[in-house]
């Protein structure tokens, strides 16, 4: 890997297979992945090795575990993907349980950090739909599991917004109306 000593990636543990596990949704953030790869960073995303959306949870957990950090790119439609919400839960769990520090880097792409943290705006709309799904469920056991899962997603979103605001990475915040997709 071509990394200068002053690069944050230069301090990554040699045991990591990837510099980063990139969690994002949508083509509007695809250019970030491309830029990371062009910069020579070993970046994993779930459609690298397999057909998009087909990677199993144990394989995702392994990829997260083998990554030095996890940029989570929150965009307007991020929460509409249960898969991405499950990734956030796995990333938070990895950070909380890993003996070697696993960095979590929240990136806010055209969304406010407080909207992600408090599930407002497009996040509120999506979670309202999840609440409707819970309310429509007639099987009490399934309803209980859905309630627990949605609660865990909300908790993971809150936690992810609190990571490293003043640390090495800080928040990456891309909201300028003049920002153009590449």
Image (cartoon, rainbow, N blue to C red):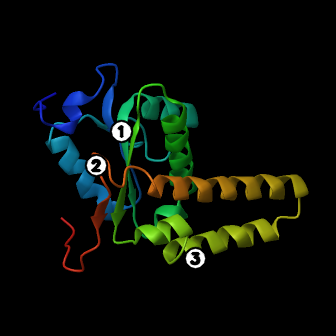
Above or below, 30 relative to 87: below
- Circle 3 — which element? helix
Is label 3 or label 1 in front?
1
Is label 2 or label 1 in front?
2
In the displayed structure image, the side of residue 94 where residue 4 appears, left or right: left
Is label 3 or label 2 in front?
2
**Cβ–Cβ under 8 Å for marks 3 and 1:** no
**Cβ–Cβ under 8 Å for marks 3 and 2:** no
User: Disc 2 designates what residue?
Assistant: 169
Q: Earlier in the sequence, mark 3 or mark 1?
A: 1
- Circle 1 — which element? strand
Numbered label attached to residue 125: 3
Quarter in which the N terminus is drawn: top left
Query: What separation in Å lies between label 2 and label 1 (alpha carbons)?
Result: 11 Å
Query: What separation in Å lies between label 3 and label 2 (alpha carbons)?
Result: 30 Å
Q: Front-most of 50 and 78? A: 78
Image x and y of residue 16, in percent: 34, 24
Image x and y of residue 21, in percent: 37, 40
Q: Earlier in the sequence, mark 3 or mark 2?
A: 3
Sort mark 3 into few (<14), some (14-19) or many (20+) by Cα contacts within 10 Å.
some
- Circle 2 — which element? loop
Q: At x 22% / y 68%, what residue is drawn?
A: 181
Image x and y of residue 152, in percent: 65, 52
User: Disc 1 designates what residue?
Assistant: 69
Image x and y of residue 111, in percent: 39, 71
């Amino acid at each position: 890997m071509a990394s200068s000593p002053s690069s944050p990636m230069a301090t990554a543990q040699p045991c990591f297979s990837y510099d980063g596990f990139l969690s994002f949704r949508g083509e509007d953030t695809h250019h970030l992945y491309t830029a990371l790869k062009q910069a020579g960073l070993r970046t994993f995303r779930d459609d690298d090795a397999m057909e998009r959306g087909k990677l199993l949870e144990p394989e995702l957990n392994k990829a997260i575990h083998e990554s030095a950090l996890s940029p989570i790119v929150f965009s307007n439609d991020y929460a509409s993907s249960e898969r991405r919400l499950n990734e956030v839960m796995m990333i938070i769990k990895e950070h909380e349980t890993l003996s070697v520090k696993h960095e979590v880097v929240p990136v806010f792409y055209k969304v406010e950090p407080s909207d992600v943290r408090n599930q407002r705006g497009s996040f509120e709309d999506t979670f309202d739909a999840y609440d409707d799904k819970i309310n429509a469920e007639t099987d009490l056991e399934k309803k209980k599991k859905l309630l627990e899962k949605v609660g865990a997603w909300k908790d993971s979103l809150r936690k992810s917004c609190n990571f490293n605001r003043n640390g090495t990475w800080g928040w990456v915040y891309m909201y300028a109306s003049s920002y153009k997709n590449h």
